Image: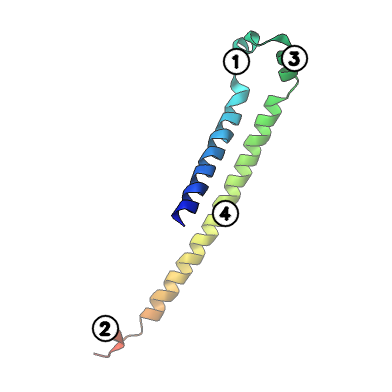
Amino acid sequence: MYNFILQIFIMVSLGTVVFLVARILPRISETEAAIAPRAKVSWLSSIPFEKIDAAVNAFSEKMLRKIKLILMKMDNTVSKQLKNFKKDGDSGNGENGLTK
């Protein structure tokens, strides 16, 4: 079981690194692009990195808001369950269910 959790953690970490690199990619300066051969520069210049970056930012914001909402709902559910446990445990009896 621990091996499976470790594999999931490693894959999520790798995905996070790839995601962060993809977000930084549009910010590469033009001087670095001038070093590359002309064929690659013309091909890369046709890709709308600004639009892709804006779309990724919008998608990230929406997903984070949805995750926040789900976590808040889960928190409310857990809080209600804890209150129910506390009410059930408060039967007015002493320790171990014995009356005083």
Residue 12: x and y, percent? 53, 43
Helix, strand or loop status at disc 3: helix
The kind of residue tagged 3 is Ser
Furthest toward the bottom, the residue is 99
Quarter of the figure with residue 93:
bottom left
Quarter of the figure with residue 29:
top right
Quarter of the image that includes the C terminus = bottom left
- Label 3 or label 2, whichever comes before in sequence order: 3
Helix, strand or loop status at disc 1: loop
The kind of residue tagged 1 is Ser
Q: Nearer the viewer, mark 4 or mark 1?
A: 1
- Label 3 or label 4, whichever comes before in sequence order: 3
Residue 69 is marked as: 4
- Label 2 or label 4, whichever comes before in sequence order: 4
The kind of residue tagged 4 is Leu
Helix, strand or loop status at disc 2: helix
Is residue 83 depicted above or below 49 in this figure?
Answer: below
Q: Nearer the viewer, mark 1 or mark 3?
A: 3
Q: Which residue is mark 3?
A: 42
Asked whether disc 3 touches disc 2, contact meaning CB atoms under 8 Å apart, the reply is: no
Q: Which residue is mark 1?
A: 29
Residue 95 is marked as: 2
Asked whether disc 3 touches disc 4, contact meaning CB atoms under 8 Å apart, the reply is: no
